[in-house]
Image (spheres, helix red, strand yellow):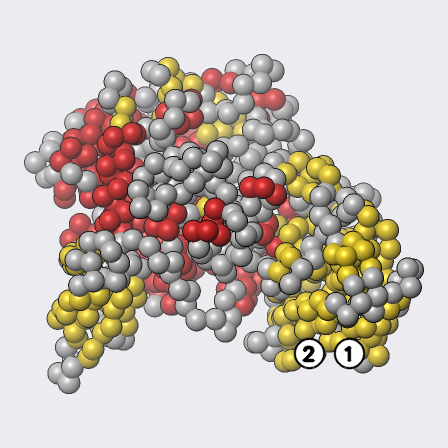
Amino acid sequence: MGEVALSLGAAEVKLTGVINRYKDAILVESSEVLWDGMEGQANTATGVNWTVNVIGKGLVDSTKGLELIAEFHSGGSSEQTAVALSFSWSEWSERNYVLVPGAIYAGNRFGVRDLSYAPCWSRLDDHGPDVPTLITDVPRLSAEPGIPSAFHLLTGDAASPVIGCIDEKSSSGWLFVTDQATDYGDTSIHMEESLDRTTARIAFQAPGVRPQLKYEMATTSVTSTDRGHDFKAGDTVRLRCRIYRFPCTSVQALFNQFAIVRRQAKPPANLAPSLPFAAAWEIQEQKYNALNWNKLLGYYAVGTIDMKHQDWQIGWVGGGMSSLALLLEGSELSVDRVLVTLRFIFSSQTDSGFFHGVCYKGEWYGDEFSGDPNRRYPEQWHILRKSADALYFIMKHLIALERVSPEFAIPQPWLEGTRRLADAFVRLWDKYGQFGQWVHIGTGDILIGGSAGAAIAPAGLALCGDYFSESTYITVAKQSADYYYKQFTVQGITTGGPGEILQCPDSESAFALLESYIVLYETSSDREWIKRAEEAALQCMTWCVSYDFQFPEGSTFKQLGIRTTGSVIANVQNKHSAPGICTLSGDSLFKLYRATGKQQYMELLREIAGNLPQYLSRQDRPVRGWDGQDMPPGYMSERVNMSDWEGKAYVGEVIPFSCWCEVSLMLTYAELPGIYVNKTHSRVTVTDQVTCSLEVKENGSHILSVCNPTDFKAKVKLLVEDEEEAGLPLGQCASIGWQRIELAPGETLQIWV
């Protein structure tokens, strides 16, 4: 076979061009390109001659990498055919870390349990604090020796069309970057290992074909419907790939390089034109008071539909989180209802100190989703992430109440309940040296250990320790965060945030760790936590979509002009991206930017937060659900479906539910500045839907021009600092004291700052 060598030494990687012919997604012929320099040809069994020209620019070891542009020219008719660039390792190891952003972490090489959605731990025999990491049947490299090991994805399955790996033997890292699609449709991403794991191959194929089987909702055993193109004589496929090789002795070094490559040579992302945060807030607050308020039981429900998991869930999907935003920005009615919601929360506390996870029509339930009759004691299972979220957000409520409503006397039972919750986490830590993922709601003991599901607990404990002047809480906060850092951040894997994915890698626990590291820095002033926060932030970045996906013609998102940059992939099982971070504003990224001055964190936050309003259904711009009905004003769906994991027809379509991402948008307005000015560097960053310019006068003063180009009234939060002020921690609920700028539609204001 003919190959083009790209490197020298033990980590030698070679390029092969391939022509693949399929019949109903089953590979029937594979013809390799015979190279002569960077030109080559291949002859298929059907007698079709293909010529291939490869143009190479740059160097694989340079900061800009090596760009390969391969043009495959068909010399005849070839049905159901795809072309590929393949990169092979002759000295591979299963110990090598493999990354596809948002889809594959450490190769997803974990133990697998074959369960239909929603997978229930209580149906398994794998219980206890020392359960190894277990995942559902998702695309992965095999953890079992001697059996086939491969994954096959479309570019829409990933946050970035990238595959990366660490060659442990040579201490080299590799990143291969392609485009979403060619003229013939979306490209596919492939990796295969030999049975003995000593060789491996990475490939990009156009059009994308997943051979034989594809992934859908917790199973890799669905028959693939992908189809090659029916090429005619003279047809050309242009396949592009950028390749980077770099010294790499840790997983973090791979993430560091990805951060450089992710949007290399691209300007800051253009935000999707939409409505200002304040205008979105008005729609959302009205919706929450009209549709989410449970008058009978007294709480803001997490959804609007009469079903169990749309009623009340603490933490995770918004219970006791939406109320923080409403406390910070809401009307008198909203604030009154926030206080009633807090009373309800503390009424849900159990003898263990943790909270009941689910309430439906006044009845308490366990946290498992399935109604499988074979489950064992399902009502006793509690997702600890929910009580961890509750501890963190209760502390933020208490801090906010002292500033928003200083006349309100916080009831003693709330303070005692908060300490009981913190004590429950301390008991877990003292007994097990971890928090675990699932606990027994009655005893508080670990049912399922491991995972980073409760990764926000250190943040809650640190705030609790400061608030109550209790050193034990602070000590456990630091010890547990140190545990999470060594067991998860250093390993490049965060698992267990969502409650219905077993322990698949996920973005929610990654962002929770970032939150904890930032809070520990702000409460201790120890900059070691900033170093760890930077590592966590770059891992979070891998879950964030780096480009604007081109949706199918006629799809809802194509018609709405949705820009996917900054949306966040949930986890490797539920392969949709989503508007925002579940369920946070991302202010930890803003605080990290202030602490380091590194623009990449502010740009990532701007991508995430600034693109949120486009997903909001409005009277003047409704978002249509996949049931064919327009969602009511104020609704946001969690589905940003670039993947066909729910079926090809659902790419660019949304589930017509009121979802947690509404809370992310509400918290974004409540906790983040829409305009941030650093006077020392004369730099202005805009996240809201306004345009700004900053003029520096001869005397060193600054004039900020702000224009509202939208058809909506804007009320924008402004934070102006110099470098010295930016170096000081913000703490919690800092937005309460920020300036607000009100602009009518089309109005421009000039402000001395």
Please tell me which residue lies in front, 476 or 254: 254
**Three-letter amino acid code at the position of disc 2:** Gly
Secondary structure under tag 1 reads loop
Going from N to C along the chain, the mark reached first, 1 or 2, is 1
**Three-letter amino acid code at the position of disc 1:** Met
Quarter of the rendering containing residue 44: bottom right
Q: Position of residue 688 (x, y in %)?
A: 29, 58
Point 81% across, 80% down: residue: 37
The image shows residue 242, relative to residue 453, as above or below, that is below
Point 26% across, 42% down: residue: 283
Q: Position of residue 741 (x, y in %)?
A: 16, 59
- Quick one: label 1, few (<14), some, or many (20+) residues within 10 Å? some
Q: Name the residue beneath numbered marker 2.
A: 56
State the mark number for residue 38: 1
Quarter of the rendering containing residue 16: bottom right
Point 57% across, 76% down: residue: 64
Q: Position of residue 507 (x, y in %)?
A: 49, 47
- The quarter in which the C terminus is drawn is bottom left
Please tell me which residue lies in front, 459 or 480: 459
Secondary structure under tag 2 reads strand
Residue 488 visible, this angle: no
How many dots with numbers?
A: 2
Residue 124 visible, this angle: yes
Point 66% across, 32% down: residue: 113
- The quarter in which the N terminus is drawn is bottom right
